[in-house]
Image (spheres, grey):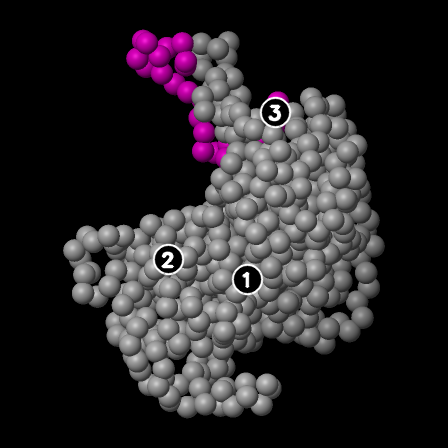
Amino acid sequence: MVKQQEDVKKQLQQKVKMTPSEAIVETLVAEGVKEVYGIVGSAFMDMLDLFPTAGIRFLPVRHEQSAGHMADAYTRVSGVAGVIVGQNGPGITNMVTSVAAANQAHTPMVVISPSAGTPTIGWDGFQEANQVSIFEDITKETVRVTHKSRVADCLRTAFRIAYAERGPVLYDIPRDLFYGELEEQILQPHQYRADKRGSGDPVSIEKAVDLLKNAKHPVIISGRGAVDSDGVETVVKIAEHLTAPAAVSYMHNDAFPADHPLAVGPIGYMGSKAAMHTLKKADVVLAIGTRLSVFGTLPCYDIDYFPKDAAIIQVDINPRHIARTHPVAVGIIGDAKATSDDILAKLQAGDPSPEKNVARLSTVSKLKEEWEQELVDLAMVDGDPINPRRALLELTKALPANAIVSSDIGNVSSTANAYLKFTQTRRHIAALTFGNTGFAYPAALGAQLAEPDAPVVAIVGDGAWGMSLHEVSTAVEQNIPVVACVFNNRSWAAEKKNQVDYYDDRYIGSNIEGPNFAEVAKSMGAAGYTIEKAEDVAPIVEKALKDRKPTVLNIYVDGTQLAPPFRKDALHMPIRFLEKYKHLDYSSWKK
């Protein structure tokens, strides 16, 4: 069998006759693709028919948006670009939200996008849409197959750009071009793309090292790039060499080990006050593998923490992100690990055994202790039935060190930013700055497929759960043992908090009712538990993780205990001029 496989591989490395579908599938095999996510459709059925023989598993979802989120998380955990496919027209347009989310998350992905057949393009036929134009602004590139002889070449281009620019690429192929015959050579990835990036300009690295050597209050921000490049270990060594506190960028809590003495936690919305107070005093900031997004550096807890006068050293693989949001002293275009390795080597060469800054370590320790105590104190305030912070605190107690946690967008999901701590990389899979609800559960399914033996938990609000609960059927059908923790406060709580603070408790559209999600899960073949006592959270989570079955926990939490608004800068007190609306003016109820 092994010899036969080798013979086939050698044969494909020469130009041989094959169908376009065969050329596409063999290119996927060469790229190490093991799963493709989507919903079955006639447009790509000829390709689909080859998957089982090729060793590719087709994962049928219940909504194509979920396919994109699954592929996104699969890539974040495995490092292999996810692949999704759908029926031309509505199947592909259903993917818009998840592809846009992956684009902002810098996740390599290939969207196989069958389109209307070449004989009928432009006739507004059945299931026709201009898919290329729809996806142009939410992908790194749209690659169009113009002839059947180009199917493999264009797919190679799609993968090359997806990895090079860290994001999704649309591979648009008219549905009739899956058929016919061509002469093709199946290339291996190293023949058409480079996986390794350099460490950046040596002169810039020297400048960065000089700044770090002379810094009185250096602080490190470690981001997604450090994780993706497997560079976190080097970042830790830089922190230790400098005795520099290390924060993690917004919702990348796995970018620096939380149990390290120099770790201060996440910045960004509902992050760590210890990180914010530390960063506020920095005179030099080493930002590794992070674009320093606007939302991820906004003031929080009324702390305007991002330093205005610090010298920022920003390391990013994408030149578009250097100094895009904050002026820098040194910008380095390079791989996070390779650049960190060079910075560390030069620091060690200049000072082989530096003394630890005991005072700095003591300050970090004190700030962390105060913040940890505040988190516990906030969680222990009584709730009806459960304080959401208490539920998060109990949940985190039950998670083993290798647990992967996906988190949605919303009030409770975002509050989790303060409570989630990781000591291993590729463990935190968050919705990030596109901010769409319905992300966490399908993302958890993809993460579980990428690492089948790891415990995987999704943190979801009941509003977001309404957008993803249909995928419990996928989990049951495919036996994916993810545990969904649904924090049920019967509301779109982030929006409700805005109506509390800015609209005098006038709730329009933010209060929602739903079924008992645990019972719904049972009806779909999953395990389901309803939790109304804080002390039940940890033991039930532990049981669910041990049972290794698709499970839904319906955790009822207090709908009045809400986190601050996401964007205080984006809202204003209501002013009304027309007489019929005067009673809604803030001046009428803020006296």
Q: Position of residue 109 (x, y in %)?
A: 46, 62
Location of mark 1 (residue): 75
Q: Secondary structure at mark 2?
A: loop
Three-letter amino acid code of the residue under disc 1: Thr
Three-letter amino acid code of the residue under disc 3: Gly
Mark 3, Cα crowd under 10 Å, few <14 / some 14-19 / many 20+, is many
Q: Secondary structure at mark 1?
A: helix
Q: Which region of the structure is painted magenta?
A: 559-585
107 sits to left or right of 453? left
* Mark 1 or 3, nearer chain start: 1
* Mark 2 or 1, nearer chain start: 2
The structure residue drawn at horizontal position 50% and vertical position 12%, both measured from the top left corner, is: 590
Q: Position of residue 294 (x, y in %)?
A: 49, 46
The structure residue drawn at horizontal position 49% and vertical position 77%, both measured from the top left corner, is: 30
Question: How far apart are the two marked residues, 2 and 3, measured between alpha carbons?
Answer: 42 Å
Location of mark 3 (residue): 559
